[in-house]
Image: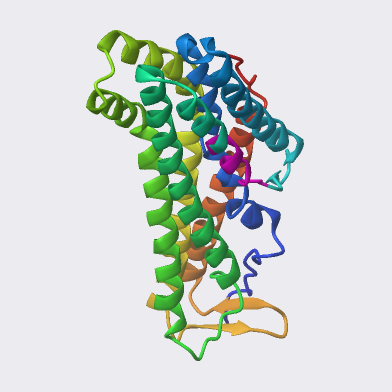
Amino acid sequence: MNPPPYRPPQEGKNPLVRQILLASLIAVPIFGLVAFGAYRSIVAQQKSRAGWQEVKSSAGEIHDDLKKNYDPKTGVTNVDLSKFDKMRDGLKNVSQNSTGDDARVADAMTGYLDRMQAAVKNYQDVANKLRAARVLDDFDSSDQKQIPARREIVQQFLEANGALKLVITNSEDRIRADLVQAKVPEYKIDRVLDGFHASVAPKNVLTIKIRQCDDKIGGAMLDALNMLETEWGHWRADATVDKIIFRSTTAREAYEKDLADLKAAANEQIKLQGVLVNQANPQP
C-alpha cells in the first residue's frame, strides 16, 4: 500500500514562503549610514549640513517604514528601496559642498552605498524570479526537465544572497581601503570607522544571521528538488487535489524534513527581523 499523500506548503499561499522572498531584504544595513555623522567635521559646514540632514532623514524613514511594515507572523510585508536615491542625493550634496578630506569621506560613503545598492538590486531581482517560478509548487510529474531549471533559479538566489552577505561583511574594510586610497589622514579614517562600527556592528550580527537563514532556505529547496529528481518515476503530482504522492516512505520522510527545515529557517528569520526593526535607530 502506498503511504498517505503529502501536501507541501504552496508558494504564494504560505506566508512563511512569501516572506522569504520579500522580507529578508531588511538585512540591508542601510542604518549604518547614520554612523557617518560621527565624522563631525563634515556637518560643521553650513552647506554640507543640509546634505547630511537629507541622509539622516532618509535613514530614519527607512527604519520607520520597516518597523511599520513588520508583522510578527509574516515578517516585513513591504520594502521601499527608492530611498536609496534620496540618500545618494544627500551624500552628493555633502560631497559637492565640502572640500578636502570632508569631500573624500563623503565620496567613500557614496561608494559604500553604491556597492550595497547594486547587491540589493541583484538580490531583489533574483528573489522576485524565485517567487515567480514557484519552485516548490505546480509540479508536472511527466516533465523531468523542470527540476534542473528550478534548481538553477534557487542557485541564483543563493549566489545573490552570498554576494549581498559579502558586501555586508566587507563593508568596513572596503571603506577603509577607499579612504586610504583617497589619502585621508589615518586619524580621520579611524574617526569615521569608529563611528561606523559603533552603529553598524550590532546590526550586522543580525543581518548576517538573516543572510544565513536565506542560505538554509535555499539549501532546503535544493534538497527537496534533488529528492524529487532522485525519486523520479516514484512520485506523482496530483493537480486535482494539489498533492505530491511518494511511493517510498523513506523518500516522503526526507522530503518532509527538507520542508520542515525550510519552515524552521523562515520562522527564525521572522524573529530576527523583529529584533532588527525594533532596535533603536541611532542618531548622529
Quadrant, the N terminus: bottom right
Vertical placement of 139 versus 27: above or below? below
Q: Is residue 58 magenta?
A: no
Give the image location of residue 107, x and y in percent.
40, 31
In-front residue for pair 178/98: 98
In-front residue for pair 180/30: 180
Report the residue at 56% width, 80% height from top: 139
Report the residue at 57% width, 43% height from top: 85
**Span highlighted in magenta in the image:** 79-88
Vertical placement of 134 versus 116: above or below? below
Give the image location of residue 35, x and y in percent.
50, 19
**Which SS type dominates the magenta stretch?**
helix
Quadrant, the C terminus: top right
57 displayed left or right of 164: right
Q: Is residue 85 magenta?
A: yes
Give the image location of residue 182, x and y in percent.
27, 26
Quarter-wise, where is residue 237 in the image? bottom right
Vertical placement of 82 versus 198: above or below? below
208 displayed left or right of 6: left
